[in-house]
Each structure stands twice: as C-alpha cells, then as structure tokens.
Amino acid sequence: MKRLMFFLIITGFLINCVFTSTRVFLDTIYEVDYINYNNLDFNNIASVDSCSKIYSFLNSALKISIDNFEFKVNFCSIGEVGDNNFQVSTYTYLWQKNLPYPNVSFLPWISESYIRYTYNFEFLKENVEFISTIGRQKKEFINGMVLGDNGIGYDGFSFCVNLGKYLYLDSLFSRVISYGGFIENKKFDLYSFLVGSKYYKSFDFGISTTLENNEILNFEKIFYEFFIKRELTNYYYIFEYSFQTGRKEQMEYSGNLWFLKAATRGKNKYLGESEASLVWLLSSGGDERNKFEPSFYRKYYFLEPYGYGDFAKANINNIFFDLPQGYSGIFVLGFNLLINPLKRFFAGLGYYLFSSPSAPDNKPEPSATEKTLGAKKAIGVEYDFSVRYSISDILDISLYYSIFNPTKGVYEKDEDATKLGIYVKSKF
C-alpha cells in the first residue's frame, strides 16, 4: 500500500507539471474500529455468544481535472483481525453471507475508475450543465433505499443534466457481473433514472425509477420512488414513498416503503449546537410477491450492516440478529439527541423501537404508537449512548455503547445484548 500511495503522489505531481491548467486532488480516509458484542444469543446458552474484533478501512482517491475532463481512480482496502463472522455457536447471520467487497484481507481493490466530461451551455437564458461518466462509479439515489453502491461502485455509464433551478436529471446504466453473491459470468442489467426540481426555495422534490433485469434468477422488478426534501437553518426533513412492481414468470410483484426523517436544530448556552431528530421507516412484508426487496439498496458500512440503531442496524429488509422466524418487513421508529456542550466534544442519545408489519399471530404486540404507524408485531427496543471528540479537523475519535432489549416472547430468550464500539477516523 505504501508503494501505491507513493505512485499516486508522483503521478499527480508529474501531470501537474506537464499540464499547467490541470488540478490534482489526492484524498485519503483511514478508519479503525474496535467492536465488542456480548450475549448475542440473549442468554440461550450457546457455545459462543460474545465476540470482539478490530477492522480497518483505507480509501485513497486520485482525481485529475483537465479542462472539461475529470479522471478518477479510487483504491480501497478493508481487513479485520479477531473473531470472524460474529458467529453464535455455528450460526452465521444473513447479512454476512453476501458482502459485496472483492476481499476483506487488506488487499487493495478499485471502487471507482472513470472518465467524466462536463459541458456547459445556455438554454432559455438558463445555464445548462451536462455531465457524462463512463467506468466504475459510485451512485446513490435519495437515501439509498433502492439504489446504493455500498462503497463498491457500479460498472457502467451515467449522465446528469442540470437545468438551473428548474430541473435536474440523473441516471445509471450498469451491467453487474459479480456483486453481493451473484454468480460470475452472468448478467444483471440495472437501469435507474431520477428527475427532480429545486424550483421552490429550500425544497427538493422528484421521482426516481429503477429497473432490475435479473437474468440469473429470471425476473424483472421496477421501483418507483417519490421524495420531497426541505432544509432550512433550524430544521430539515425528507419524506419518501416507494413501491415495486414487476413480474417473474407468472408471479406479479407488489410491496411498498414509507420513510420519514426530520430534525430540528438550535444553539444553547449550555448544550451548544444541538439537534433532535426522528426517523420512521416501514417496509412491506409477506411472501416473495409482497415483500419490498430491491437488490442493490444500501445495506453495508464496511464490515457491519448499515441501518438505524448502532446495534440493530435495521434496514429495509433485516436487522443485525436476523428477523425472527415468521417475521417479514421492517418497522423502525427512532429518536436521537445530539449535543455539543464543549468545543469539539459531542454527546448523543438514541432510542429505537423495532417491529414488523408481518409476523405470526402469537407474537407480542407493539405499542399503540407503533400500531398507528403500521407495525403489527414487536421485535425489541434499543438504547444508544455515544461521545465523539474531534481532536483536529482531520482526526476524530468516538465511543458508543448500545443495549438491545428483545421483546419478551419474540426470541427463545430475552435478556439484553450489548455492543461497545470505539473508532478512530482520519482524513488527509
């Protein structure tokens, strides 16, 4: 890796010398995480129910701009030491089985490698920007609920058009050869389009369409996402509604997703710059026809699941522990408070309710609030505590502690599971 870094620096220096109008950027992010899990089986007396591990992530990106052209190559490396696979006895969680990364043994791989061309012109007295990109590129629409690259990028072509404040268009055309457990040398066509507008001040709204043409499993799915965002100094919110259609042989798909995230911000003499936020997520469950299940939604943060709650990491289909037998679909209702009482010091408190819209009748009921918002059966509650200190503009250190309390009657046992995490992140 040291040789690779040296090569990137020398290459950027030489290009900058040859082309005087060239701009060269080299960005590096390095993160080290320590994680300790305890009582993962909720005291079900498994042979292994606790584990610890350390993993690190290194990302080095070289970007070169020459007039209207941009060239970028992004190298990533992920590795771990300690207890592998978070196994409880002989069980492996579902999210572990389809990691999208080429390897997790510290060997570098390419997450981006593209050529981008930008062209500006005037149309109806508005400046129009046209951007085309070919190669491996990172792409995520809205919140990554349907299209999220998980840091690995997509091979393909995309174009983006910005028509002033009136309209913007983004797209992706990709053929996925191997990703997240799919069979190599088979094709999976992925097409996605997003049309939005920022015509009204502080508003961003639009629609996204994603088509999955999976020749491996012989099906097609189409997803439609409607969204509206608004951000002001003291508050912001984003609301999304999405539904899926499509057909596999004689079976027709349905299913939907509701998502809301909102926050209010303020400054206090004692609490500093603080933020209180709310998140609500509801994805439909049921059998294969009715379950909302895109293939490429955002679901990984390096070697952990990506989602809501530091422990449960609930996303649109699953949680860290896997949904209990007979459960399908996800309901999340979460509250967070972040304060900044001292310079460079932040403290956070989180509370999450996890339920499901589809589960066996004999499972425990959720709260009245959860029922009103679409939940049918309870799963558990999570409490998060965190502190973060920014040592400098390029170095952060964080500590967090989470408690997951399964609702009595959901799993075989119901004692609390805990997670302790420490991470150090640097940018340079």
Image (spheres, helix red, strand yellow):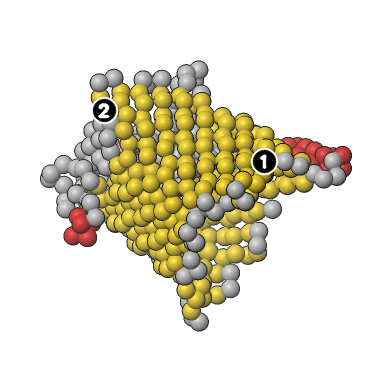
The secondary structure type at the circle numbered 1 is strand
Kind of residue at badge 2 = Glu
Work out how far the residue at label 1 is from the one at label 2, CA to CA, in angstroms. 41 Å
Residue placed farthest to the front in the image?
A: 124
Q: Using residue 10 as the reference point, say whether residue 32 is left or right of it.
A: left
Q: Which mark is residue 118?
A: 1
Kind of residue at badge 1 = Thr
The secondary structure type at the circle numbered 2 is strand
Percent position (x, y) of residue 22?
80, 44
Q: Where on the picture, by quarter, is residue 165? A: bottom right
Determine crowd level at label 1: few under 14, some 14-19, many 20+ residues with C-alpha closer than 10 A: some
Q: At x 32% / y 49%, what residue is drawn?
A: 258
**Residue 369 in the image: above or below residue 413:** below
N-terminal of the two: label 1 or label 2? 1
Percent position (x, y) of residue 312?
36, 50
Residue placed farthest to the bottom in the image?
A: 269
Q: Compare residues 203 and 366 and report the one nearer the observer.
A: 203
Q: At x 37% / y 32%, what residue is drawn?
A: 222
Q: At x 32% / y 36%, what residue is drawn?
A: 244
Q: Are marks 1 and 2 in contact (CB under 8 Å)?
A: no
Determine crowd level at label 2: few under 14, some 14-19, many 20+ residues with C-alpha closer than 10 A: some
Q: Compare residues 205 and 260 and report the one nearer the observer.
A: 205
